[in-house]
Amino acid sequence: MTDLAWIDLALTSARPQAMGALLRYFRDLDMAEEAFQEACLRALRTWPDKGPPRDPAAWLIFVGRNSGIDQVRKRAKTRPLPPEEVLSDLEDTESDLADRLDGAHYRDDILRLLFVCCHPDLPATQQIALALRIVSGLSVRQIARAFLVSEAAMEQRITRAKAKVGAAGIPFETPDALARAERLGLVAAMIYLVFNEGYSAGAPEKADTPFCTEAIRLARLLLKLFPAEPEIMGLTALLLIQHSRLAARFDADGQIVLLEDQDRSRWDRALIDEALVLIDKAIRHRAPGPFQIQAAIAALHARAATAAETDWVEIDLLYQTLERLQPSPVVRLNRAVAVSKREGPEAALALIEPLAEKLDGYFYFHGLRGGLLKQLGRYAEAHQAFDRAIALATTSAEAAHIRQHLDSMQCEAAGGAMFPAP
């Protein structure tokens, strides 16, 4: 590790805790962020010579808070100083501050920070952008590149999100047990959105964005704060298993490789083993939830040495349980894959046909439907479904994958009645 690498690691690790505490002090995202950035600059100037402080997070909060108060006092020349209760907790001893960080504020500060970023008034894209900027500290350029927009557009998106959060008047008191449970579910959903934004990028160089690794880091942080929450165990396990397949998800040409065709020797077994321990631990709580069930499904795939050994009966049962807990056309669509393996394409097609209206704008519906129709030899209908899927594809890799199906179907149909040309 280089001389400055340890500082970068310490700042990154301390950021959620420090930003959460500074947000509690100043009640303003911009002010908290400015205070944290000033503290980081001072760390870069002093830590190389003096060495790391005993508690980097406490040091950053102490320095950031004082820096923010100085800025408020400078601005007071043109406007009144905020009341004392707004600039709360103005003790000047680092030791007292460090002691308080070990108490109840620690969890609530970070949970509050995460909750602010996933405010329900914000669209999902703004939630993700705000969390990556405020909690993870990714640059606007990094986030803009991942979203395929200009830096100026992303800066505006984050600014609008901050303004909406500020106008919402989010309360800063310590949440009670009921409110904490509600917030925890929202935060978990936001972290899952962050992961999916990276996982669904559709090309190997884009799928390896900071989104997936940041989502896993945030999930692990949440698990550290709430080690007895089985749904957070399930969320973390699900992300780990999904990310373990990164190296096998695309071929040398950048084309998508389906799960059943992936080289399982390229899966990251360390991530899978970590996830399996979490799943087994979550199951012992006997409080099943959607993330736990999805993680259990992923674990069945991970435990199978080959695609042929996959326990599709158990996967179907788990999807039925998930559908009872969280009814959704997409869950039904995923279950249809397991049904096709158990009972054949005709049974799976019967399961998804009623979803046609609800999922007409969904790429994966038409891709799966086309594949099932192809297996049944209904080539003309399959061709129409594949055409619709290509029209809905959001990445070139998705479109190329469907075109491969069309090409293979053309070969299969060559000996019989041809389907109409597009």
Image (cartoon, rainbow, N blue to C red):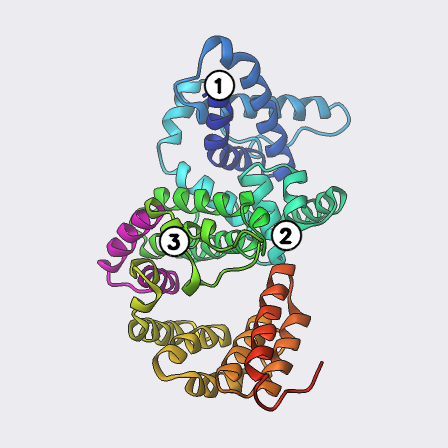
Image mark for residue 95 = none
Q: How far separated are the C-alphas under marks 2 and 3?
A: 26 Å
User: Per the image, is 279 magenta?
Assistant: yes
Mark found first going from the N terminus, 1 or 3:
1
Left or right of 175 in this view: 420:
right
Q: How far separated are the C-alphas under marks 2 and 1?
A: 35 Å
Q: Amino acid at mark 2?
A: Gln
Left or right of 177 in this view: 124:
right
Q: How far separated are the C-alphas under marks 1 and 3?
A: 31 Å
Q: Name the residue tied to disc 3.
A: 241
Q: Name the residue tied to disc 1.
A: 2
Q: Count the marks.
A: 3
Observer-nearest of 216 and 179: 216
Mark found first going from the N terminus, 2 or 3:
2
Q: Residues within 10 Å of mark 2 (few under 14, many from 20)?
A: many
Q: Disc 3 on helix, strand or loop? A: helix
Observer-nearest of 82 and 138: 138
Q: Residue at x 29, y 67 (%)?
A: 309
Q: Amino acid at mark 3?
A: Ile
* Residue 360 found in image quarter: bottom right
Q: Amino acid at mark 1?
A: Thr
Q: Residue at x 29, y 72 (%)?
A: 314
* Residue 384 found in image quarter: bottom right
The extreme front residue here reads: 415
Residue 395 seen: no
Magenta range = 271-300
Question: Comparing marks 2 and 3, which lies closer to the viewer?
Answer: 3
Q: Disc 2 on helix, strand or loop? A: helix
Q: Residues within 10 Å of mark 3 (few under 14, many from 20)?
A: many
Which quadrant does the N terminus fall into? Answer: top left
Q: Residue at x 68, y 39 (%)?
A: 141
Decide: is 318 above or below 157: below
